[in-house]
Image: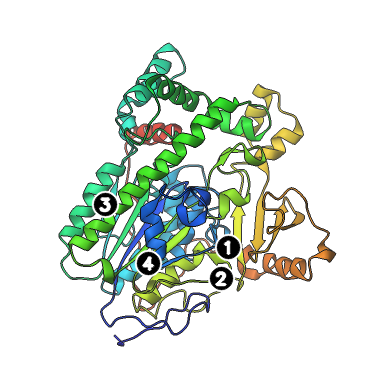
């Protein structure tokens, strides 16, 4: 391997010199972390000091964009460098993680853990989100991959009910505030792996769900009094299930201001918990003497809404609060860029940092200096599930339209063009960050034409052929067979999806 390498992330930082020894890479995805919940992006000083220190030591990208507004497609892009519709994963084909696994296993050699493994890296991953697990195909290329479901699933039967027993279970969950959503177990596993580091360059990946609903961090991060903790848990039971999230997006569900206040407070406390978790991971790297030779990347797969734009949680939109994400990095290969950075560029960035130049992303096929995001609905207006839901709640066509809209967005950082079911609107993000006042396209000094050209780029509308996908140079590792699951295991997976508000 050459003594030096130039990072080429869409042409942003050519000439950056890297050490001869390939660096370790730690990619941490703090699921559902809003950009404004992190210190480098406007959160109060002292709220996320570890993330703030990481940004001071490296860089906090100001224009980082997720490729979608929910977990599966965003992670798929971070792992493959492809847009959701290129993969056919705007939604899982039949709504299940297993159907997503079928797609990802066709392109397994194109996933960054497989490319790094093929290039001599050890690979280890942990995830607390079912959509980023072996059940969804994300274990490919990892020598070790551990899915850690929420400890709250120990009480899943009661927590998923609707009667008095369920309310009591949620109330007790809030009152005790002892459980997290798997972060402690993942932290133990990661720190053990770091302590046992053999000297082989290693790629570590972590997904943590603590900022994801139901926003119930453990004490001492949950600093509310007992009665407020109970009420916050009951808020989660009532307002953060899939049906309520859909009804809120359709304009048919109300959430009291005090419930939103509790959610926002505990969400910020969950972000503080994640910052403490990150500090422990960085300390473990430092104790092992490898912090300075590790590229640490901390980001989010999407943001979260708390009533803004008529939304709660995520999905159903490509609103700025959902796709404009934090992205902080430090260490060998860290980059800075003033313009837009798509998370689909992360595989290329990591491989270039590792000195792996013969990778599938050497010739980027995406629009340059523009970030693309895509959101596909869970179903069309005539889908049986949508029809049944609309009939049961007496939703009119406008309400159904909120649930079935298809979005594509392109941004150059200053302007943003959104196509909703083919209807285009242009926004000036500098003067209208909440996207309330569409511009006359003729007043945008050519921005409309360039962003529209980006939406018409072949890669934006491309899809991979059935039965195959790109593979890394030299053949790479072969796709693995999907794991089989018993009826009992499938039922448990369904309960996990419900607890996370996905069904």
CA separation in Å, label 2 and label 1: 30 Å
Tag of residue 383: none
Give the vertical position of 331 relative to 35 (above or below). below
Which residue is pictured at 60% across the width and 58% down the height? 373
Q: Is residue 413 visible?
A: yes
Q: Evaluate if marks 1 and 3 touch, with contact meaning CB atoms under 8 Å apart.
A: no
Give the vertical position of 354 relative to 77 (above or below). below
x then y, percent, for residue 436: 74, 48
Q: Residue 476 occupies which quadrant of the picture?
A: bottom left
Tag of residue 463: 1
CA separation in Å, label 1 and label 3: 41 Å
Tag of residue 338: 2
Q: Secondary structure at mark 2?
A: loop
The residue carrying mark 4 is 57
In the picture, which quadrant includes the N terminus?
Answer: bottom left
Relative horizontal placement of residue 379, taking residue 206 as reference (left or right):
right
Tag of residue 280: 3
Q: How many marks?
A: 4
Query: Residue farthest to the bottom?
Result: 2
Crowdedness of circle 1 by 10 Å Cα count: few (<14), some, many (20+)?
some
For marks 3 and 2, the one nearer the N-term is: 3
x then y, percent, for residue 66: 53, 57
Q: Residue 50 occupies which quadrant of the picture?
A: bottom left
x then y, percent, for residue 38: 46, 51
90 or 274: which is nearer to us? Answer: 274
């Amino acid at each position: 391997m050459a003594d030096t390498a130039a990072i080429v992330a869409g042409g942003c930082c050519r000439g950056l010199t890297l050490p001869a020894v390939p660096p370790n890479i730690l990619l941490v995805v703090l699921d559902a972390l809003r950009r404004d919940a992190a210190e480098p992006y406007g959160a109060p000083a002292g709220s996320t000091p570890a993330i703030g220190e990481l940004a001071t030591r490296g860089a906090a990208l100001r224009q980082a964009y997720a490729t979608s507004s929910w977990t599966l497609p965003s992670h798929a892009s971070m792992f493959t460098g492809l847009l959701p519709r290129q993969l056919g994963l705007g939604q899982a084909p039949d709504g299940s993680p297993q159907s997503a696994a079928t797609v990802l296993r066709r392109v397994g050699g194109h996933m960054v853990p497989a490319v790094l493994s093929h290039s001599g890296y050890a690979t280890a991953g942990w995830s607390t989100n079912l959509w980023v697990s072996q059940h969804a195909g994300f274990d490919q290329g990892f020598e070790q991959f551990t899915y850690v479901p929420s400890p709250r699933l120990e009480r899943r039967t009661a927590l998923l009910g609707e009667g008095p027993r369920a309310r009591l279970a949620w109330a007790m969950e809030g009152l005790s505030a002892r459980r997290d959503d798997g972060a402690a177990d993942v932290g133990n596993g990661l720190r053990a792996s770091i302590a046992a580091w053999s000297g082989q360059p290693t790629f570590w990946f972590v997904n943590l769900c603590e900022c994801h609903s139901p926003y119930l961090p453990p004490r001492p991060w949950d600093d509310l009094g007992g009665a407020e903790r109970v009420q916050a848990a009951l808020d989660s039971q009532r307002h953060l299930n899939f049906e309520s999230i859909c009804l809120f997006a359709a304009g048919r569900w109300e959430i009291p201001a005090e419930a939103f206040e509790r959610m926002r407070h505990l969400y910020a406390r969950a972000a503080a918990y994640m910052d403490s978790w990150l500090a422990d991971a960085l300390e473990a790297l430092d104790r092992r003497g490898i912090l300075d030779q590790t590229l640490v990347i901390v980001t989010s797969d999407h943001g979260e809404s708390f009533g803004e734009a008529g939304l709660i949680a995520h999905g159903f939109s490509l609103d700025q609060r959902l796709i404009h994400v934090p992205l902080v990095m430090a260490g060998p290969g860290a980059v800075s860029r003033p313009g837009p950075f798509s998370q689909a560029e992360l595989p290329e960035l990591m491989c270039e940092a590792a000195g792996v130049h013969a990778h599938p992303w050497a010739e980027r096929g995406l629009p340059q200096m523009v970030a693309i995001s895509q959101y596909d609905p869970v179903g069309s207006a005539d889908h049986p599930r949508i029809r049944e839901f609309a009939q049961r709640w007496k939703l009119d066509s406008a309400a159904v339209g909120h649930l079935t809209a298809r979005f594509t967005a392109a941004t150059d950082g200053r302007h943003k063009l959104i196509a909703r079911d083919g209807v285009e609107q242009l926004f000036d993000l500098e003067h209208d960050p909440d996207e309330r006042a569409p511009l006359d396209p003729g007043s945008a000094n050519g921005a409309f034409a360039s962003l529209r050209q980006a939406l018409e780029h072949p890669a934006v509308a491309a899809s991979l052929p059935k039965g195959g996908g790109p593979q890394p140079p030299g053949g790479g590792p072969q796709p693995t067979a999907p794991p089989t699951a018993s009826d009992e295991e499938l039922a448990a997976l369904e309960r996990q999806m419900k607890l996370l508000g996905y069904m």
